[in-house]
Amino acid sequence: MNSFLRSATFTLVITGVLAVAAASTASTWCGENGVIRFSFDQDDTTSTTLQVEPDDQGVTRVTVRVWLTDVDPVALDGVSCEAIGGYEFKLLIEGAEVFITNVALPEDAMNLVGKHLTYVVGLRKSLGINDGKVLLGTWQLAFQGQPSNVRLGIAPEGVMSCADMSGCHESGTRALYIGSSEAGQLEMIFGAGCQPAWINPTGDVATTAERGASTWQDVGLAETAGSSTWH
């Protein structure tokens, strides 16, 4: 059985006979490289906490941006991994009932799964990794009243493509992303950890990044690329 993420991405970037032929090729686990982090600001500075009050209508509104960060510059068979062609994760929001009022995915992106807060996103246009990070999307959240101790994270059971991929399922990784079609790396899948963030925490909260047990160095398929800044 092929990876759900890879097959979904192929439906967006390849057509006709090529799609059928390519989908028969097994995906390859490359190890974990990166961390999912959250931002409550307009810029690309990631955050771990936010204090916010309800508006005049008694609704607390939060804009959260989801980033893939801390990506080491690596290459596969001498070709740099400079962009991603899709990603997969399940957003986890705990501590209060949340209403998702809007989701803005990257241009020409499509979520292939209809499950609540589960995203298997295929990209017609690959997303470039710049300085080790890439924006995966923006979510508009709404809460009745003023919630406290709301935790944002990535559910560990949200990576469906791990189920049939050797080395991935047992790694405990939180999210997946796939290489770009331009680099011929659609069959190569990396994992990512997650650093949780909190809305209106009332005391000390855990913000340590949760990582999987299998890094790209452990797997050994990728090698360090020549530059620390990708474009």
Image (cartoon, helix red, strand yellow):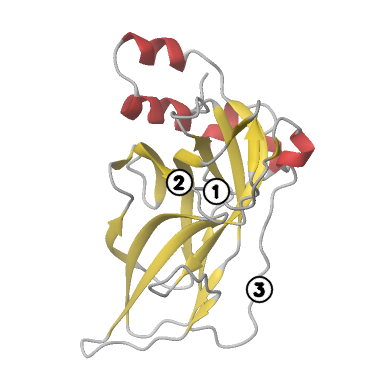
Give the CA distance from mark 2 to mark 3: 31 Å
* Marks 1 and 3, how far apart at CA: 31 Å
Residue at the limit of the structure toward the right, as seen here: 218
Left or right: residue 216 compared with residue 202: right
Label 2 element class: strand
Label 3 crowd bin: few (<14), some (14–19), many (20+), radius 10 Å: few
Q: CA distance from mark 1 to mark 2?
A: 8 Å
Give the image location of residue 29, x and y in percent: 64, 31
Residue depicted at 64% across the width and 46% down the height:
73
Read off the residue under disc 2.
Answer: 128
Q: Which residue is mark 3?
A: 206
Is there a contact, CB below 8 Å, between mark 2 and mark 3? Answer: no
Element under disc 3: loop
* Lateral position of residue 161 relative to residue 112, left or right: right
Amino acid type at image mark 3: Ala
Mark sitting earlier along the chain (1/2): 2
Residue 225: x and y in percent read: 67, 41
Among the two numbered marks 2 and 3 on one chain, the one whose residue lies closer to the N terminus: 2
Amino acid type for the residue under numbered disc 1: Trp
Q: Residue at x 50, y 49 (%)?
A: 129
**Contact, mark 1 vs mark 2 (Cβ under 8 Å):** yes
Residue 46 in the image, given as x and y percentages of width and height:
52, 70
State the image coordinates of residue 170 (x, y, percent, origin top left).
71, 37
Q: Can you name the residue that lies furthest to the left here?
A: 57
Mark 2 crowd level (few <14, some 14–19, many ≥20, 10 Å Cα): some
Q: Is residue 35 above or below residue 97?
A: above
Tag shown at residue 139: none
Number of the front mark, 1 or 3: 1
Name the residue beneath numbered marker 1.
230
Which residue lies at the image location 41% right of the left edge and 75% below the top edge?
A: 41
Answer with the quarter of the image where residue 216 lies. top right
Q: Tell me whether circle 1 and circle 3 mark residues in contact (CB < 8 Å).
A: no
